[in-house]
Image (cartoon, grey):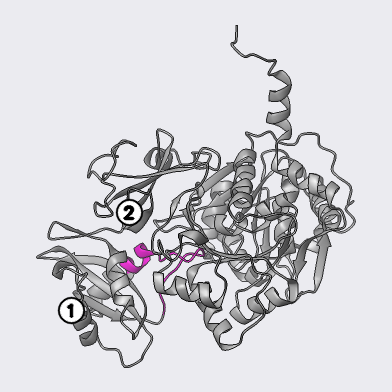
Amino acid sequence: MNSFTYNTNTFRELFENDFTYLNGFLRNVSRFPQKTALTCPIRKENWTYRQLDGECNRLAHALLADEIKKGDVVVYQLLNSAKFVFCYLAPQKIGAINCPVNFRLSPGETAYILDESKPAVYIFDEEIKDMAEKALNIARHSPRRVVMAEFRGNEKPFAGSITYDGYVTGRPESDPGIKRPTSIYDETTRLYTSGTTGMPKGVPLNNLNEIFTAHDVIMHFPLNQTDKTMNMSPWFHRGGLHSGGPCPTLYAGGEIVALRQFNPRVCLAHVEDYGLTYLIGAPPMLKMLHDQQAKEPRDLKTIKGIITMGAPLEREACISFQKVLTPNIYNGYGTTEGFWNTFLRPFDLPRMAGSAGRPCTDDEAAVVKVYPDRKAEPDDYAARDNQEVGEIIIKSPAKCSYSYFNSPAEEERVFYKGWIYIGDLGVWNEENYITVVGRKDDMIICAGENIHPVQVEEILNEHPKVKESAVVGVPDKTRGEAVAAYVIKDDPSLTVKELVEHCRNHFMLANFKRPRFYRFVEALPYTATGKKIHYKVREMALEDKEKGLLERA
């Protein structure tokens, strides 16, 4: 006998079967049939909610004709475009899983994902045709259907593939008519981590994860049907798809403007031309927007806010952004697994610039102690003194499925007692503001002392002739590891001697933390979300040290 005070049967039936992301979108198709849902500035096209629904139905019918069924996977590697949105929504109409993948991956990395997720359909952008063909030749798995999505129409499909337009031509715009294609528990979207620590991992998201992620953005921006959003970064990652991208905007009834490739001048022109209310992107993009606006001002009066994620905002940069772009700057911090979990709002800035903010409304975040042989318990806190470095852990029951696709060992490593142990190191204070200081896996141990790369990088970046830097550890006979710095010059006259003096004289850098090796480079490896990939820099450093290419300080 249960202890409920009411009959739960109807509630459970409706909640578990009808509270789906797809139904949220379809409500807006009914509410706002003539309202613009999607705009492509390059092709000068737009789609109302009714037209967008019709295009998604055409693709859904094409998938059904290929006998794609519930639980099958549709992998798509597309730049931001209308077809990306069709691929996000159409599989949900038939109970299939949509799986957007980074279009910047190498053929081998793409083949790895194809072999792991075994998609029934693989859709790729015409701009990456050569890479896609190589990936398919490498992969053991052969998708049932391979489709090339045209954009400018400059490419012909390779043997064994067809064009997207050819795939959906003649298909009806009517709903496929599948009643309740998914429940709240079914996987609807599969994302792949950006790979900062190795090969990408599949992150399954169910309907509740999608809905509550949309709710989180709607609540924190806030976002409504009058808004027009443009994500300046790619949609294939969680910060793209879910932060002002298709997921929350179409759930709120707003309009998304598809930015195919980032260009600061174009972005600012779109704000003026389309009346955009929210821009979303990584901090380096904001810096370029700032510089462009300072040089060639555009009318930004429609902007309600600019949201950034993927890296902390430095205080001076934040003040400049607020002055030149908008006072309403936001910064989110999180993971593919749990979306953003802490957030800085305009009223937090610039006072708390540099921190990752406080936990989001439905989330919890903590900093726990670090042990060499085990996880800390979730309540084994580091001191809230902004001094003791610990591991940042997150609890996000609404936005996280607490699982990886086909990776039980990774699940055991990352998920523990309802918390996500994401491997970031940080400090926190009595107000629960968390500041990220580095990655647990990136920690450099020099003569028994822990060195966090981010601290050294920030000090190097303060030098007026430095554009960017990355710091890693390399083997050292006397210290165990020594610090090596890769530096991009902002001034060609910069020398190693100047950097040595800068670090030696800096009041925030202990002697043992100073770089012992340097190399000047033209570029550093970044993920699509704007995070430095330290393990790739370390691979470069090990090879460069062997070849004698590192300059000793």
x then y, percent, for residue 231: 62, 65
Q: Magenta residues?
A: 523-539
Q: Magenta span: helix, strand or loop, mainly?
A: loop
Q: Residue 534 in magenta?
A: yes
Residue 398 in which image quadrant: top right
**Most foreground residue, 223 or 439:** 223
**Most foreground residue, 9 or 110:** 9
Q: Is residue 239 left or right of residue 390?
A: right
Q: Is residue 92 depicted above or below 527 in this figure? A: above
Pointer 2 local density, CA inside 10 Å: few below 14, some 14–19, many at least 20:
many
Residue 382 in which image quadrant: top left
Q: Is residue 418 depicted above or below 63 in this figure? A: above
Pointer 1 local density, CA inside 10 Å: few below 14, some 14–19, many at least 20:
few
Q: Residue 465 in magenta?
A: no
Query: What secondary structure is found at the residue carrying circle 1?
Result: helix
C-alpha separation, residue under disc 2 versus residue under disc 1: 25 Å
As drawn, which residue projects farthest toward the top? 1
Residue 493 - label: none
Residue 140 is at least partly visible in this image: no
x then y, percent, for residue 383: 26, 46
Query: Label 2: which residue?
Result: 426
N-terminal of the two: label 2 or label 1?
2
Query: Label 1: which residue?
Result: 505
Amino acid type assigned to the residue bearing label 1 in the image? Asn
Residue depicted at 74% across the width and 21% down the height = 10
Residue depicted at 39% across the width and 56% down the height = 197
